Image (spheres, helix red, strand yellow):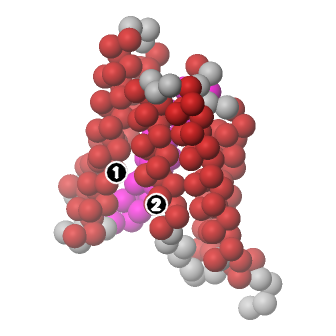
């Protein structure tokens, strides 16, 4: 595994996840703001590692695997905590998990056919809007804005999942 700058940033994001979780489980209000800072830093590494990988030709197989995994782990960690504390409906987390597993499965089937399904813009918008909504919920927005954030997460998740399957429906075609 080449230890490029982009890969180091991805590893940093992975290492920030347990730090975020520990801070979220501490009961002092100041810890939540520190957790928000850690979460924002982790989100920034997501943007930065992608930028560096593309612009400085540091794209690697490790990065292709670890970057989306780190994103999913970071987002799922926050969403699971929100469900546990009652600030996110559990069924929304279930929809998010279903979409992630389904798209990953679609990609695995496509790989067997020699195809690569790249990240779609709707998937990037889903990730970015989800990360922003998580930051807002962490910040402690009023109930109505929390509800808006939940709906944004839900709608972008469902839309991007449907788009992946619609644009790649031929992956399931039996005609070869």
Residue 17, magenta (yes or no): no
Residue receiving disc 2: 124
Residue 78, magenta (yes or no): yes
Task: Decide: is 122 above or below 78.
Answer: below
Give the left or right position of residue 45, taking residue 75 as reference. left
Query: For the residue labelled by badge 1, is the local secondary structure a helix, a strand or a loop?
Result: helix
Query: For the residue labelled by badge 2, is the local secondary structure a helix, a strand or a loop?
Result: helix
Residue drawn at point x = 31 percent, y = 54 percent: 47
Q: From mark 2 to mark 1, how far is it between C-alphas?
A: 11 Å
Answer whether residue 135 is visible to the viewer in this image: yes
| Coordinates of residue 35 in the picture (x, y in percent) | 36, 25
Residue receiving disc 1: 46
Q: Quadrant of the N terminus?
A: bottom left
Task: Decide: is 111 above or below 22.
Answer: below
| Coordinates of residue 176 in the picture (x, y in percent) | 74, 91
Give the left or right position of residue 95, taking residue 64 as reference. right
Answer whether residue 15 is visible to the viewer in this image: no
Residue drawn at point x = 47 percent, y = 40 percent: 133
């Amino acid at each position: 595994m080449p230890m490029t700058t982009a890969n180091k940033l991805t590893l940093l994001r992975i290492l920030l996840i347990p730090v975020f979780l520990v801070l979220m489980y501490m009961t002092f209000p100041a810890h939540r703001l520190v957790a928000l800072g850690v979460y924002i830093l982790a989100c920034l590494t997501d943007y930065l590692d992608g930028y560096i990988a593309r612009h400085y030709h540091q794209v690697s197989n490790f990065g292709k695997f670890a970057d989306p995994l780190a994103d999913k782990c970071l987002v799922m960690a926050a969403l699971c905590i929100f469900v546990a504390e009652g600030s996110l409906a559990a069924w929304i987390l279930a929809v998010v998990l279903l979409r992630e597993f389904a798209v990953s499965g679609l990609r695995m089937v496509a790989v067997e056919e020699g195809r690569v399904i790249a990240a779609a813009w709707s998937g990037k918008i889903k990730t970015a809007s989800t990360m922003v909504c998580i930051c807002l919920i962490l910040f402690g927005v009023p109930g109505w804005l929390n509800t808006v954030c939940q709906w944004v997460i839900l709608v972008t998740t469902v839309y991007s999942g449907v788009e992946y399957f619609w644009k790649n429906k031929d992956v399931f075609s039996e005609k070869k």
